[in-house]
Image (cartoon, grey):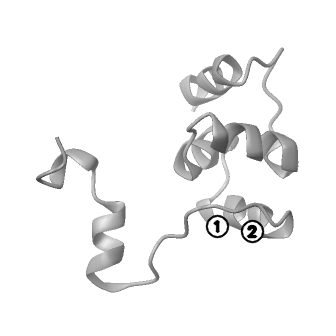
């Protein structure tokens, strides 16, 4: 978790890490624009992915939504190295 926090501080050029920063629209937009994933944000802030998605919705921030169920969801959640073809 601390590694993810340090990575966010560096990626977003922050002075320090704020545990509740994920509730800020500007912070989330900057993080997503910098390529930070929802999983990384959730890990760094010690909240669920659902909490991050709720805040994104609350602020009307566009983001890629994972599929709800089935093979598409398993593919979405698969490690990138486990999906053949896109080298």
Badge 2 vs badge 1, beta-carbon distance below 8 Å: yes
Give the x, y percent position of residue 28.
76, 46
Residue at the spot of label 1: 50
**56 on left or right of 77:** right
User: Could you say which quadrant of the image residue 83 lies in?
Assistant: bottom left
At x 60%, y 60%, the residue is: 49
Dot 1: few (<14), some (14–19), or many (≥20) neighbours within 10 Å?
A: few
Residue at the spot of label 2: 54
Give the x, y percent position of residue 20.
84, 43
Q: How many marks?
A: 2
Q: Quadrant of the C terminus?
A: top left
- Judging depth in this view, the residue of 50 and 12 nearest the camera is 12
Whether residue 49 is visible here, answered yes or no, is yes
Dot 2: few (<14), some (14–19), or many (≥20) neighbours within 10 Å?
A: few
- Judging depth in this view, the residue of 54 and 35 nearest the camera is 35
Separation (CA) of disc 2 from disc 1: 6 Å
At x 58%, y 52%, the residue is: 38
Give the x, y percent position of residue 86.
19, 48
User: Could you say which quadrant of the image residue 41 lies in?
Assistant: top right
Give the x, y percent position of residue 70.
31, 85
At x 78%, y 25%, the residue is: 17
At x 75%, y 45%, the residue is: 29
**68 on left or right of 44:** left
User: Could you say which quadrant of the image residue 7 lies in?
Assistant: top right
* Residue, far left: 84
């Amino acid at each position: 978790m601390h590694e993810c926090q340090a990575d966010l501080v560096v990626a977003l050029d922050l002075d320090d890490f704020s545990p509740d920063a994920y509730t800020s629209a500007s912070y989330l937009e900057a993080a997503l624009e910098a390529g930070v994933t929802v999983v990384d944000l959730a890990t760094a802030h010690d909240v669920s992915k659902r909490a991050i998605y709720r805040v994104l919705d609350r602020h009307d921030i566009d983001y890629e939504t994972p599929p709800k169920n089935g093979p598409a969801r398993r593919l979405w959640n698969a490690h990138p190295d486990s999906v053949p073809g896109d080298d």
